[in-house]
Image (spheres, rainbow, N blue to C red):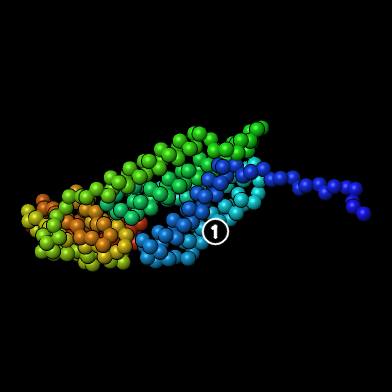
Amino acid sequence: MASLTAAVPAAARPPRPALITWTIASLLLGVALVVYLQVAILRSFDPPLALIFGTPALVFAALLAVLRGRWVPLLGALYWALVLAANALYFAYDLTHPEFLESFIISITMSLTALIGVAAGVGATVQNYRPACNPRLPRWFATGVSVLAGLGVGAVLVALLPRPGVSAATLAQLPALITAQTRFGQPELHAQVGVPVALRLENLDPSGHSFDIDELDVHASMPPGEAALALFTPTAPGIYTFYCNVPGHREAGMIGTLIVTP
Ligand SMILES: [Cu+2]
């Protein structure tokens, strides 16, 4: 005998709002970028660093996918805001040094992903607290993403333009100052007042460095895997400090002494 009570269909889950999907996507893209940065660019995978960065992103992405609490998308925005704040110094350095092309592209992609993640997370939370939740992507968000993507692509194209430089043949004739494993090859350099100094700066590391002597106004970038030129003429005898201005490198030991004799 057939049951008289019809099975009550389970309440259909409302579709996931588009902004939550974008928040989840930003978190997953962030994890992928960090792994790519370590494996392909820095060529040294650091599991603790990947875990510190990746674990909360993956946990928050899973929570956003499963939970429907109105405040949940804020977790994604909070995560990205913290990433932006903690790495502001590095992002600012990379974004102002397009000659370090790979770091430049990674930092542009990462900071834009972070901005999109913050906007999507905050936007999704605001949508959730509105009486009539519209799951579609808001126009302001689509426009913002388009503008940011356009700016990012434009900046990368400009960074790809060839830079004027000294020929490899000329550089090859100069004495070299090599950087490897975040160290200068020579801790001490010697020069004479009034005699021009021309150095071939050879960076064997997979990330960028620089050669800076503040008192002599020497600031030369050393893109990874390339040779660059430092050209200056000391005007006063003394003991000067040369160092790398990439955040954290001077403190890590990229520092040396230039002794200028009369
Ligand atoms: Cu350095």
Quarter of the image with the C terminus in it: bottom left
In the image, the residue with mark 1 has its CB under 8 Å from the nearest atom of ligand 1: no
179 horizontally vs 132: left or right: left
Q: Residue at x 46, y 57 (%)?
A: 32
- In the rendered structure, the answer to whether residue 61 lies left or right of residue 179 reads right
On-image quarter of the N terminus: bottom right
Left or right of 232 in this view: 150 = right
Residue 81 in view here: no
Q: Which residue extends farthest top?
A: 131
The residue located at (61%, 50%) in the rendering is 65
Near-viewer residue (28 or 207): 28
- The quarter of the picture where residue 170 lies is bottom left
Q: Residues within 10 Å of mark 1 (few under 14, many from 20)?
A: few
Q: Residue furthest front?
A: 1
Does any portion of residue 150 appear in the rendered image?
yes
Give the SS element for disc 1: helix
Q: Residue at x 54, y 54 (%)?
A: 57
Q: Label 1: which residue?
A: 55
Q: Is residue 81 above or below residue 197?
A: above
Residue 2 placement (x, y as % from top left): 90, 52
Type of the residue with mark 1: Thr
Is 152 above or below relative to 245? Answer: above
Q: Position of residue 165 (x, y in %)?
A: 16, 52
State the residue in front, 138 or 187: 138
Q: Position of residue 159 (x, y in %)?
A: 28, 48
* Foreground pick, 260 / 19: 19
Q: How many marks?
A: 1
**Left or right for 33, reference 201:** right
Residue 66 drawn above or below residue 70? below
Between 8 and 237, the residue placed more toward the observer is 8
Q: Position of residue 108 (x, y in %)?
A: 38, 48
